[in-house]
Amino acid sequence: MRVPFVDLHAQYLSIKDEIDNAIQSVINDTAFIGGKYVKEFENNFAKSYGIKHCIGVANGTDAIYIILKMLGIGPGDEVITAANTWISTSETITQTGAKPVFIDIDEKYYTINEDLIESKINSRTKAIIPVHLYGQVCNIEKILTICKMHNLFLIEDCAQSHFSSLDNKLAGTSGIASSFSFYPGKNLGAYGDAGCIITNDDTLAKKIRMFANHGSLIKHEHDIEGINSRLDGLQAAILNAKLPHLDNWINKRIFNAQLYTKLLNGTGDIITPSVRENSKHTFHLYVIRTKFRDQLKDYLISQNIDVSIHYPVALPNLKAYEYLNLPTEENSITNVFQNEILSLPMYPELSSEQIGFVVSCIKDFFAAQ
Ligand SMILES: *Cc1c(COP(=O)(O)O)cnc(C)c1O
């Protein structure tokens, strides 16, 4: 048996006619840039979040950059984010001219440790970007309180947390604006690069829409200079076709995660994911921890099971951030966990038989230790 890490082709086959029709419609209408499919997706996505504005952009990285830039963040400013996230969250801070400030992750939930945030706030701090990592919502109420107290912008990176929620509040609806990625492997994935921004702020929404389209809302009128970062018609139509299925796909991910957790119970030194109380963890990734990570990873790969690490080198330890000269004790949990975390295959179409096979291989590995 081979178990891939994700299987995007299986998902395509399950809704082939809907996808094929969506693509054909865009071609028939030659609605490649802008147009009705983009509008339709933006409306549907905003509505499903109960948020006033959704602006499609080229990818989830641009989404963060555009929000920061339109909030006026730039040289001399600092922006706080988590030490363990994808580099998009921090490289976009740098792109604006501001400085990224990393906070260690929480031992139990692997999201930004909200208790450490205030120690890093100073007069240059302008915003906090919590990341709802792996599909798990951060302690967003506490972070929002800190933002209000210190007059900081809250920007939520929701690239891994479409429709995750805590206390029935959707991730991405607490801050001034939130970014989403529709990278193919994300829980809602396009067939190429795509992303969006949601916000309830009318002025900010207008600025974002303008900046993402060369500084223009009306053709040939440019109030400002912008960039070219648009969601295209084909991607929008594909996302429109997929959106009604997302709830079902998320439920399948949750089912698969619960099965893994049940079957892995008591295996070796494995620590399975903790889910925050009263929350919906949407399991973009199913991440376990073990001191035998590297050996287990090699063993599973030898058994035709694809596994991955998110992320093998935490941001503060990347060459790109050597210049920050961060003391290693600053991100001690992140530094330990980067050597222990392992992402197991996770996608809606993953079968119980496949999960059983992965778990039995893990049990074989520990029995031989
Ligand atoms: C995927 C991802 C992004 C970036 O999205 P792209 O669409 O690939 O640019 C940003 N932040 C996090 C946490 C991600 O996982």
Image (spheres, grey):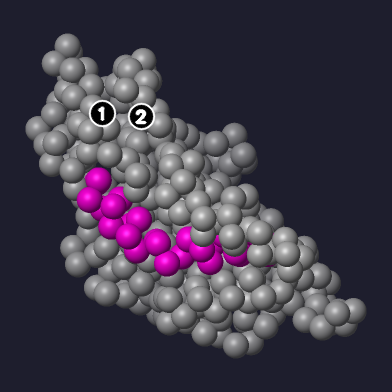
Q: Is residue 260 above or below residue 356?
A: below
Q: Is residue 364 above or below residue 86?
A: above
In the image as oriented, which residue stretches furthest toward the bottom? 202
Q: Which residue is mark 2?
A: 3
Q: Secondary structure at mark 1?
A: helix
Q: Label 2 sits on what residue type?
A: Val
Measuring from the top left, give residue 10's x and y in whole percent: 43, 42
Q: Which residue is mark 1?
A: 358
Measuring from the top left, give residue 308's x and y in whole percent: 41, 32
Measuring from the top left, give residue 122's x and y in whole percent: 50, 67
**For the point 33% across and 18% down, which residue is it?**
303
Q: Is residue 21 visible?
A: yes
- Residue behind label 1 places its C-beta within 8 angstroms of ligand 1: no
**For the point 66% across and 59% down, which residue is it?**
24
Residue placed most toward the observer, 143 or 116: 143
Question: Is residue 238 magenta-colored?
Answer: yes
Horizontally, residue 225 falls left or right of residue 197, namely right
Horizontally, residue 121 falls left or right of residue 322, namely left
> Dot 2: few (<14), some (14–19), or many (≥20) neighbours within 10 Å?
many
**For the point 64% across and 71% down, which residue is it?**
38
Question: Is most of the magenta stretch helix, strand or loop?
Answer: helix
Q: Is residue 96 visible?
A: no
Residue placed most toward the observer, 42 or 352: 352
In the image as oriented, which residue stretches furthest toward the right? 220
Q: Which segment did they paint magenta?
A: 232-257
